[in-house]
Amino acid sequence: MSASSLVAEAVWKDIESTRAVTDDQLSILHFLFGKNFERATRIVDQRGIKRISGELSGRFVFQVVGESRRKEEYFCFAENYCACYSFFYDIVNRGEQLCCKHQLAARLASSLGACVEVKVSDEQLALLLSKL
């Protein structure tokens, strides 16, 4: 794991424990993620993150609204996957970013308790995930 990833992880844990973000934490996250962090905060401000959970298993996936006029919705696991184009282009292929704006938005909303919570049956969640 890179030093940047370790710093980011420490900041996320801090935010999760207090459910608040300090100016110092904002500065660190902005330094690490740049324009993606700014975009992620806009998505969070617009309440564009759903946390879809299986009722019995507690397993979950995030559904994050994109910023374009089409308002696409992307499924992601905040720490390691997003179905958006940027994830595959900038993170997987080029290795230029730690994560995409949708992952950041999901992580930030989750840390702050700002997700729209949606409960579904485990069968519905499995069906949803099978389409990824």
Image: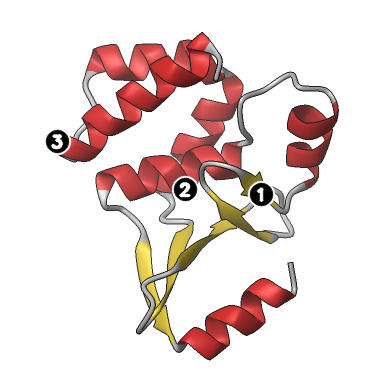
Discs 2, 3 touching: Cβ within 8 Å: no
On screen, residue 123 versus residue 9, left or right, reads right
| Rendered residue at 36%/72% (across/down) | 58
Mark 2 burial class by Cα count in 10 Å: few <14, some 14-19, many 20+: many
- Name the N-terminal-most of marks 1 and 2: 1
Discs 1, 2 touching: Cβ within 8 Å: no
Mark 3 burial class by Cα count in 10 Å: few <14, some 14-19, many 20+: few
Disc 1 to disc 2, C-alpha distance: 10 Å
Q: Say if residue 29 shows up in the picture.
A: no
**x and y, in percent, of residue 73 in the image:** 65, 62
Q: Amino acid at mark 2?
A: Ala
**x and y, in percent, of residue 10 in the image:** 32, 22
Is 113 rendered above or below residue 53?
above
Q: Which residue is mark 3?
A: 18
The foreground one among 108 and 14 is 14
**x and y, in percent, of residue 121 in the image:** 45, 89
Is 21 rendered above or below residue 44?
above
Mark 2 falls on what kind of element?
helix
Q: Amino acid at mark 3?
A: Thr
Disc 3 to disc 1, C-alpha distance: 26 Å
On screen, residue 31 versus residue 109, left or right, reads right
| Quadrant housing residue 39 | top right
Q: Amino acid at mark 1?
A: Cys
Q: Which residue is mark 2?
A: 106
